[in-house]
Amino acid sequence: MRRLILAAAAIALAACGDRAPEPPVKEAPSESVSAKPKRSVPRPAPWTAPKVARLYGHFPYAEAARETLRAGVCSGGGERQYLNADAAEALARMRAAAEAEGVTLNPSSCFRSHASQERLFTCVDAPHGAGCADGQLISAEVRATAVAPNSYSEHHTGYAIDFFPSAGDIDPATCPKANACTLTTAFAKARSGQWLAAHAGAYGFEMSFWQGSPQGVSYEPWHYRFVGAPDALSVFGDARTEFPPP
Ligand SMILES: [Zn+2]
């Protein structure tokens, strides 16, 4: 009898084995996962650097450190005679090359401080300039198409040059009077303007506000910036990225 009871218990224990915990589920091999159709997981948009805040189309620029500037380079008076030393050396080579072809370049207005840009933009220094009427500002938006607001001029960097017509440009076909080619689009037809358009790039200079640029600044065939040195390239990096020169 005792043997029968033990046998029954052994059978019961064996039956309990059927209800033992199931072995852990093995992870499916990766092959079987890849074989399944992929779930489309939305991916975040790639990060992009925020654009530099512009004002009326102009980029902000710090004022050049005075020790980077060389005096007596440009014909304009006061602070406008100053130009970055690297740009000045390239300019000297460029002027000599132009002269060898009978073209005189006249770099006139170069460095400009934030303070003088403020006077220019608010019609104090140029009361009859673009956007000004007897010293009154017509509209900041209109004025800014021709003159950068304070802290937004390339001239602050010491790398920008406004070329004025030279004596050799006084040609009835192009500049019947020097004033007709000074800071006007007619400068593009002046001999020096044409020479610059064709050769300035070889000396590290480029026209900043080229015809058709979407930047929102008027075409200025007389205004060139120097990008022929690493520091200069860095200063104008944002402008050149957003509005690549043609
Ligand atoms: Zn300029």
Image (cartoon, grey):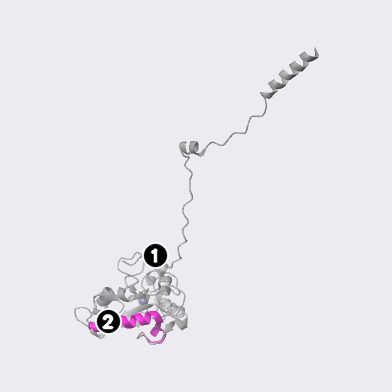
Quadrant of the drawing holding the N terminus: top right
Please name whichever residue, 83 or 137, is drawn nearer the observer in this view of the structure: 83
Q: Nearer the viewer, residue 42 or 202?
A: 202
Real-space CA distance between mark 2 and mark 1, rounded to the nearest whole angstrom: 30 Å
Left or right of 26, for residue 234: left
Magenta: main secondary structure equals helix
Please state the extent of the stretch shown in magenta in the rendering: 76-103
Using the image, tell me which numbered label, if any, was put on residue 97: 2
Ligand 1 placement by image quarter:
bottom left
Q: Amino acid at mark 1?
A: Thr
Residue 11 in sight: yes
Q: Which of the two labelled residues, at mark 2 and mark 1, occupies the earlier sequence position? A: 2
Image quadrant in which the C terminus is located: bottom left
- Which label number is shown at residue 214? none
Rendered location of residue 33, percent (x, y)? 50, 37
Nearest to viewer (mark 2 / mark 1): 2
The residue under label 2 is which amino acid type?
Answer: Ala
Residue 146 figure quarter: bottom left
Left or right: 8, with 172 as reference point? right
Picture disc at residue 241: 1
Q: Is residue 32 above or below residue 110?
A: above
Q: Residue furthest right?
A: 2
Specify whether residue 122 is in view: no
